[in-house]
Image (spheres, rainbow, N blue to C red):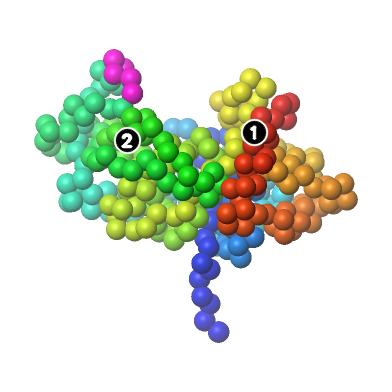
Amino acid sequence: MPQTPPNYIGRFAPSPTGPLHFGSLVAALASYLDAKANQGAWLVRIEDIDANRCKPEHASSILSMLEHYGLEWDGEVVYQTQRLPLYQQYLDALIQQKEVYWCECSRKKLRNYPGPYPGFCRDKNLPASASHAIRIKMPSCSTHFVDKCLGPVNLPPDEVVEDYIIKRRDGFFAYQLVVVIDDIEQSISHVVRGQDLISFTPRQCQLFELFGKSAPQYGHIPLVLDEYGNKLSKQTFAPAVTDDDKRQQLAQALTFLGLPPPKDIASSGCEQQLSWGIGLWPKEHHLIEHFRKNATAVRTNNL
Ligand SMILES: [Zn+2]
C-alpha cells in the first residue's frame, strides 16, 4: 500500500550550544505531544548553523537524552551544516528577485542606532561582496496572526519589522533564513516552540511568502523561567537534564505544560507518561483555552 504523508508534520529544532536543559525538554515535549496527539510526524533538526557557538558533542548529547526520555523522532535527523548549498540556492533566488541588498554598516556604526535597522544601505546598490552582510527588504507586513496556543496575537510593528540580515558578513547564513528553508524542505505544517521566538513569526511568514509557500501554523508555549525571571538557557547556566531522574523531570515537564500526571503515572516509565500525555493533550482551539487556564505555570522556581 502506498504510504500517504501525514497531514501534520511537526519538529523540534534545538541549537547544540549546550546539553538539553529543562526549558528545552519542555519545548521538545510540547511539540512532540502536539504532533502525536494529532497523529502527526515529529522530526528533529539540529540547528547548528552558527558554527562558532555550536558543538557536535552537544548535538549528540541532546539526541541521546531525547532517546532516554522516550521522545523518538520520525525519519533522519537533519543537520543545518550539511545543507549549505541548499541555503545558497534559496538565497540566489532572493537575489534574483531583488528582494535583498548588501550592507556595509559596521556593528560599531549601528550601535548608535538601537532598534530596527534604519535602512542606510537599502538604496546604495552596493555590489555583491563577501565582506558585506546581506539584508532582506522587509515591507511593512502584518504583525497580526492567530497562534495555536495563544489565540490572536498582535506584535508591535517597530519591534518586528526591519530589514534583517539573512547572511552575515562572516559568511554564515542567518538563523532567520535557514529556519524557513528547513521548514519548507521538511514540509513542516506545525511549529510549536517557546514564546521567546514569537517576535520572529511575522518575518518568517513573510519569507515563506517570498518563496511562494504557505507558512506553517505557529504555536508558542510559555517559557520556563528561573527564580530571577530569566529564561532557562545555556547563558543562565541552566542545569542539564540527566538520565538519572528522567521520570521525575518528565513529570515536571508535563506539569509545567498544565498536565500534572497522577502519582501512578508519574512513577511509571517515560513511555507511559508520554502516552498518558498524548491522550490528554488538548486539540485545536482547546489548546488556547488550556494555556489561558494554565498561564500561572509560566514561572517555575528551583528546577
Ligand atoms: Zn548598511
Mark yes or no: residue 81 visible.
Answer: no
Residue type of the residue flagged with mark 2: Val
In the picture, which quadrant includes the N terminus? bottom right
Image point (42%, 38%), residue name:
154
**Residue 169 placement: quadrant:** top left
- What percent of the width, then of the height, locates residue 123? 12, 33
On residue 161, the disc is: 2
Q: Is residue 10 left or right of residue 69?
A: left
**Residue 204 placement: quadrant:** top left
Q: Which residues are magenta?
A: 111-115
- What percent of the width, then of the height, locates residue 117? 27, 27
On residue 298, the disc is: 1
Image point (18%, 51%), residue name:
97
C-alpha gap between disc 2 and disc 1: 27 Å
Vertical relation: 190 (above or below) 176: below
Assess mark 1: CB under 8 A from ligand 1? no
User: Would you say residue 194 sits in the magenta stretch?
Assistant: no
- What percent of the width, then of the height, locates residue 180? 39, 49
Q: Nearer the viewer, residue 54 or 174?
A: 174
Q: Residues within 10 Å of mark 1 (few under 14, many from 20)?
A: some
Vertical relation: 208 (above or below) 4: above
- What percent of the width, then of the height, locates residue 18? 58, 34
